[in-house]
Image: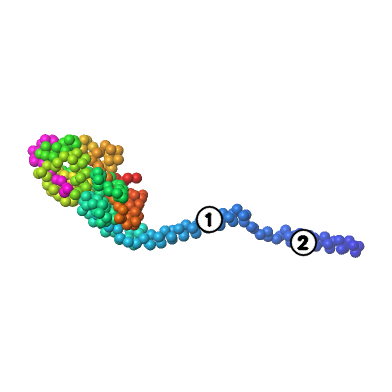
Amino acid sequence: MQHRGQLLIWMLLVVLVLAGCGGATTPTTESPENTAENATEAEEAENAANDSETGIEEQEAVTGELTFSGSTTVQPLVEQIGVVYRETYPNVALNIAAGGSGVGIQAIQNGDVDIGMASRTLKEGEQTEGMEVYQIAVDVLAVIVHPSNPVKEITREQLQDIFTGQITNWSEVGGPDEVIQVVIREETSGTRGAFDEIALEDEQNTPDAETLITAGEVEQFVANTENAIGYIGFGHVAEAIKVLKIDGVSPSPETAQDGTYQLQRPLQLLTGPLSRDLAQTFVEFALSSEGQEIVEMEGWVSVE
């Protein structure tokens, strides 16, 4: 009997121990794979934050001044790009002057500025050693007349004859019996250079032409003169004037890109061997997707 009692006590103890083990909570452990994955994600997030911080610090560390001169057509585009550029590089000052494409090209040749602006293809001999040319947009040249002029389109041949003085009356191209007042830009203008090359094939302008300095002056003159005809960059076209079709095609970004409208030219930035290294940051920004969005917003055709 004593032996049996001891056996019962022993069995009771075993049951209690087993019950205690069954009720214990087994600690949860993460697998090595999950632990490594979480660690990697944390490291990546930390690295991204550090990279962003480093990028901002590097941008703020970029300091100095960039000087520009050249095309009066490119100048306002560069100014708009410059506004957003300085949001990225707030410690860079921009000194943007104009003067015409010829002035910008010569300034880079002489090392007088960091970035030149040109609104025409460089002529033979103008791209000197160490000079780099970057096209940032396409400008479409628009031929403009007074809104009251009934003429809606002319051919390239008629356009050439008007500006060289072979056609002198609007009646010769389907308009009123009025003497044509031709308006051109001054000789250093990139717009003038592009128009003379593309439209006139380097023939001489009529000596009776009115010569004006800026695109704005040409637009205002034509808007106020019923028998006038002139040309400006498509980005400057306003409601106060009327744009002529050339060979049946209206100027637009689409007709410039597909080549059906042929009065177009490149808008370019120029750097030279004496340009500050800082100049490259502006060129790269102008060619970035953000810079090209500004190009399109300003009415030009992007190069993307």
On the image, the x and y values in percent for residue 268 come to 28, 48
Q: Is residue 10 magenta?
A: no
Name the quadrant of the C terminus.
top left
On the image, the x and y values in percent for residue 45 come to 49, 57
Say which residue label 2 marks. 17
Say which residue label 1 marks. 41
Cα–Cα span, label 2 and label 1: 44 Å
In the picture, measured across the screen, residue 141 lies left or right of residue 49, that is left
Callout 2 touching callout 1 (CB < 8 Å) = no
Mark 1 nearby-residue class (10 Å; few <14, some 14–19, many ≥20): few
Q: Is residue 185 magenta?
A: yes
The type of residue carrying mark 1 is Glu
In the picture, measured across the screen, residue 84 lies left or right of residue 26, that is left
Report the number of discs.
Answer: 2
Kindly report which numbered mark, 2 or 1, lies closer to the viewer in this rendering.
Answer: 1
Q: Residue at x 86, y 61 (%)?
A: 7
On the image, the x and y values in percent for residue 289 come to 36, 49
The answer to whether one can see residue 143 in this image is no
Q: Quadrant of residue 21?
A: bottom right
Q: Residue at x 24, y 43 (%)?
A: 124
In the picture, measured across the screen, residue 303 lies left or right of residue 48, that is left
**What secondary structure is found at the residue carrying circle 2?**
helix
Q: Quadrant of residue 120?
A: top left
As drawn, the label of residue 247 is none
The type of residue carrying mark 2 is Val
Name the quadrant of the N terminus.
bottom right
On the image, the x and y values in percent for residue 117 come to 26, 51
Q: Quadrant of residue 207?
A: top left
Which span of residues is magenta-colored? 169-187
